[in-house]
Amino acid sequence: MEKLTFYAVSAPEKLDRIGAYLAERLSRDVVRHRYGYVLIAMEALDQLLMACHSQSIKPFVESFLHMVAKLLESGEPKLQVLGTNSFVKFANIEEDTPSYHRRYDFFVSRFSAMCHSCDHDPETQTEIRIAGIRGIQGVVRKTVNDELRATIWEPQHMDKIVPSLLFNMQKIDDIDSRVGPPSSPTGGEKEENPALLAENCFRELLGRATYGNMNNAVRPVFAHLDHHRLWDPNEFAVSCFKIIMYSIQAQYSHHVIQEILGHLDVRKRDSPRVRAGIIQVLLEAVAIAAKGSIGPTVLEVFNTLLKHLRISVDFELGDRRSSAGSATFSTSSKESDERIVQNAIIQTIGFFGSNLPDYQRSEIMMFIMGKVPSHLLQWDEGENWKEILTHSNFTSNIEQVTSGYKATTITNALPAPFLDPLLSPSLMEDSELRQLVLEILHNLIDRHDNRAKLRGIRIIPDVSDLKIKRDKISRQDVSFMKKHGQQLYRHIYLGCKEEDNVQKNFELLFTSLALTTIELANEEVVIDLIRLAIALQDVAIINEDNLPMFNRCGVMALVAAYLNFLSQMIAVPAFCQHVSKVIETRSLEASYFLPETIFKDKCNEVPHEKDLFFLTNKIAESLGGSGYSVERLSVPYVPQVTDEDRLSRRKSIVDTVSLQVDILPDNNGLEEQEKEKRRLVIEKFQKAPFEEIAAQCETKANLLHDRLAQILELTIRPPPSPSGTMTITAGHAHYQSVPVYEMKFPDLCVY
């Protein structure tokens, strides 16, 4: 070998003839099974290859690769391993000039086949698989260092290389060893364990991928996972994409996320667990990408996930319809699987949103809310649950995104186009959905992290112990409350009147009032909040809505807890004294009006002693002495009436208006009544606040709308005589004894 090497180095033009001779001898020995001579010939080829680096080596390399191919084609495992070792040595040689005609298609195919070896002898099988993986690694290194390295990234090669590596990675015992950033196993472990060697090669392959060929390297992963049904369970799929996300260059992360979203669209009609597995993989990818470059895929991620959320809800709706009247185990199991999909989507959206900067979060909140269906409520009893389910999912998304959100002004956190659709689910007959809405409000309003200090509804002995953080109310916040304060009050007011409220609802309502006081309350807002609290107390006392006893006492406890908090926040001694006195009286005579008792014990009746109630005149007297403008306290709080109330199935204040019309015979009495009415109207416009007047004007306009709608539905039964009475049926209401006047046409009547 020394003489042959010296001769080849001295006369490099002879290398091609030397290589051709050795190749001829080796081919003959392989056919005749003279393996000793085969080993000698390959050793000679290897040494010559390592020693010679001249331009004339190109023809010699062709002979060398031809012989390696011969060894790999043989059925003898030892020869396959020998050929692989020689190829790996060749792959580590850096050539001076690129080879424009050399291709490695055969080696890619052969090494990939070796990775799937199924030899009956386990040791031989492992040996061949390791050789195949090392061969693929050599091809990757050789082609990446070559000027023509782009050829290895062609789909026909990646479709063989990537599944071969994944097939061996699947056999690893400890999945957790692959979930983090690239590890550094010892050389012995790499050589002995096909899974570790395949993982190392896979990481190296991905690390060398560039912008133009990233997708070609990732797409075969989806094909492999689909073919082997590895989305359910998805532990291996998750570990694969963790490896991908940690191995690729950070600026290409969004390519992988786009590919996962595209595959989710392709598999949108698969079983719920398969879709849930893909979404969980997306969550892991997003979790890693969020630490670096997310790229231009922000809206695409949310758009695709929200689309699949609606698809999942529709699938669940279809399952319920198909099982109507005969609930089966398979159907209920399928519904629960759809819930798994929905929870996975919500978790992914929440994690992605929580890692976005604040300016992007506000855009995403608007984007999610824009995806909420415009038909907010389905009035068919059998269908209403679907909208509740859909709203609950969308609302959960927003709650996740808003977690940790800090807006400089409340206008940025609650823009007008976002406020209305956000608050509308708070009127739905689902207590958990209303809780979500309140938690979103807390996320947006609480800019000083005070919510944790206010958790739980209770009588706080000394608010100063809470160390509440607050800033001076900004001009923008004052403007916001003037425009939208009535909306917030209204939803808190109506939320307290829900029959299915539980303790958590009252706790969140208390926190809402307290946070509004801390973040948004100037003197005018304080008066409004007191009017709201007194109105809630009246709801519990008068009980026009026939609320259960627990709800009435819960409202009373809420009012007590809030006024105790408010009185200490504004620090008016006379106000604090009145509130403390009422609370002390309740603790002695009606402890179930306090939060510490009502949510533990039951109450049987609501007493009507004045000492147990917070009195408007006492509050006005105490605040007036401290410079507050208390004239508005004498005007009872009345919530605005909106389209939601008129469309809602629950009883609203519109329903309490009588539609019976009386014609008074006494003209003098009518004139006196009209004078008194005009006087009250003038007095109201002189003294009542503008917001109250606007709200009542809007209420009257809505009442007129309702009356016209009901007139169109009138069913009139003519009376037996022109001067008698008749019966009018308007919708579900029934009215009798309505005076009728005979007209020129006997078949026409007016009332």
Image (tube, rainbow, N blue to C red):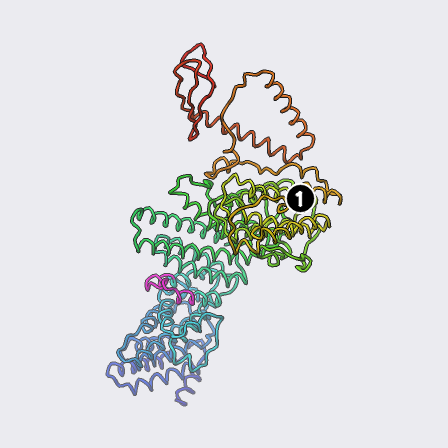
Q: What element carries label 1?
A: helix
Query: Main SS of the magenta segment?
Result: helix
Whether 541 is drawn above or below 179: the answer is: above
Mark 1 surroundings within 10 Å by alpha-carbon count, few (fewer than 14), some (14 through 19), many (20 or more): some
Is 359 one of the magenta-colored residues? Answer: no
The residue nearer to you, when weighing 301 against 473, is 473
Whether 499 is drawn above or below 298: the answer is: above
Instruction: State the image coordinates of residue 656 (x, y, percent, origin top left).
Output: 51, 33
Residues shaded magenta: 222-240
The residue nearer to you, when weighing 631 against 222, is 631
Which residue bears the numbered disc 1? 525
Outermost residue to the left: 32
Instruction: State the image coordinates of residue 161 (x, y, percent, origin top left).
Output: 37, 68
Q: Is residue 490 left or right of residue 94?
A: right
Q: Which residue is drawn at 53% across and 54% down?
A: 599
Q: Residue at x 27, y 83 (%)?
A: 29
Q: What is the total number of numbered labels drawn onto the structure image?
A: 1
Q: In this view, does 413 lie to the left or right of 371?
A: right
Q: In this view, does 103 lie to the left or right of 245?
A: left
Q: In which quarter of the image is residue 243?
A: bottom left
Instruction: State the image coordinates of residue 303 (x, y, percent, origin top left).
Output: 47, 50
The residue nearer to you, when weighing 385 against 213, is 385
Outermost residue to the bottom: 2
Q: Which residue is drawn at 66% across and 57% down?
A: 461
Looking at the rendered structure, the kind of residue marked 1 is Val
Is the N terminus in the top left, top right, bottom left or bottom right quadrant? bottom left
Q: Residue at x 52, y 38 (%)?
A: 544
Instruction: State the image coordinates of residue 405 (x, y, percent, origin top left).
Output: 59, 55
